[in-house]
Amino acid sequence: MTKNALRQLPSVDRVWRALEARGAVDAYPRALVIREIRDAIDAARAGEAPATTAAGSREAVLSAIAATVEDRLRARGKGGPRRVINGTGVALHTNLGRAVLSEAARQAVASVAGGYSDLELDLTTGERGSRLDHVEGLIREVTGAEAALVVNNNAAAVLLALDTLAEGREVIVSRGQLVEIGGAFRVPAVMAKSGARLVEVGTTNKTYLRDYEEAITPETALLLRVHTSNYRVIGFVAEVALDELVELGRRRGLPVMEDLGSGALVEFAAHGLPSEPTVQRSVRAGADVVTFSGDKLLGGPQAGIAVGRREVIARMRSNQLMRALRIDKLTLAALVATLRAYLEPGRAEREVPALAALLAEPTALAAKARRLASRLRLRAGGLGRFTAEPDASPAGGGSLPGVELPTWVIALEPAAPAAHGMTPNEIEAGLRRADPPVLVRVSQGRVLVDVRTLAREEVSMVVEAFAGLAPAPGAGETQ
Ligand SMILES: *Cc1c(COP(=O)(O)O)cnc(C)c1O
């Protein structure tokens, strides 16, 4: 910053008074406000945001800093993570917390959170129990597996499986399956952490059974198959089916693992969607261990589930890592309640919000979008023209790659700048700052709200968020 610009920086006291005049300080602890003011002044001095401080007048600098502090207080003051409204239509959005929990799961969490529980106590004998006893039988029943365990997430389940079955030895994987999920989970990196050595076979698009077979050495500990849950290779493609790999494993005395990732427990193909491998199918194919996430297509809390042969799961359970990766009581309660919906055919599709959103009928979505559009025209018509129209939503969150689900959106074509219109990006940012925040898409100069991911009670909040941005009726006419 230049000397002249440095002189423009306000004191902490001046920023405080400016914020006080805006009524922006009352809701927050004084120490927090002061800390945010100091940080904003320091950032301006260091030549960082806010941008206007470089060249602005004293007043402009003051108001830019005050605005920054106000934004940060609003974002931090309430603590987080905060509830937001997902108008993107992406049912499993990793940045938005993936699966919304079912009513039963929410109640189970609240009940366990508010008191003591029999987490590791057998109430019939009064003896010490295992937290996994609450869930293992249920997972076995739903998936058909001999045994099951649960850890923090699927990345942890994969780490635990590799560490248990292949530490210091070789694991054979197809080059076409070396996936990266969400920028943080990479099969080769997890493998390295577990101490197993990766042996890549085949090519990016084609891998045959003989490629695995030729790579087997006395050092081989495991044959691994990874479901490419967030991408699809199209064109000339060959991968080895799980049952063929299982047959090879049996013949050569090697265990076979499948990292399924998305972990569907219902047949999506039966609902007119592209087929997604189910956990039950992988278990039936004879995999020794199958791992998957609790918060993708299963629709539960963040968790990693491993199912498979009794002896393999028992070895994983007695691994020391298990203690570091174990799930807490809230997750366990939510998982058990979510899984119970899968015990009766058709119930999970109705009660698990992620499934209900993914399987929503376009006709129902159309009706919801039309109702929302007409309420928006009434309450926020000043923002521009609202229409309801068909569109497509991606499934997201490492599931159903490439699948576009037919959906309905409300589209807002903003009023022209001459009529005091806001730009689509200004509207998007305004909705993001609403309380609760509403997340939407901007596409081709329009603001889109996909109704697939709106819960019934959220529709009115969306209307209020738009209304909060709309000019008051008649505001344009007095100018
Ligand atoms: C999502 C996914 C993971 C990571 O699972 P988390 O539950 O996010 O840790 C690992 N492998 C595959 C194939 C996945 O799809």
Image (tube, rainbow, N blue to C red):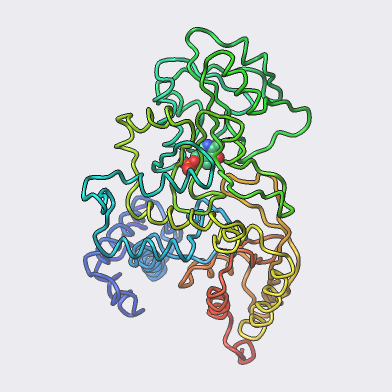
* Residue at x 28% of width, y 65% of height: 114
Residue at the top extreme of this rendering: 218
Is residue 79 shown to the viewer in this render?
yes
Residue 275 falls in image quadrant: top right
Residue 173 falls in image quadrant: top right
Q: Position of residue 31 (x, y in %)?
A: 21, 65
Q: Position of residue 49 (x, y in %)?
A: 42, 56
Residue at the front extreme of this rendering: 125
Residue situated in front as seen by the camera: 297 or 234: 297
Residue situated in front as seen by the camera: 127 or 91: 127
Determine whether 252 is above or below 206 in the image: above
Determine whether 370 is above or below 439 in the image: below
Q: Position of residue 181 (x, y in %)?
A: 54, 39
Q: Position of residue 257 (x, y in %)?
A: 53, 28
Residue situated in front as seen by the camera: 78 or 50: 78
Residue 260 horizontal side relative to residue 116, left or right: right
Determine whether 475 is above or below 44 in the image: below
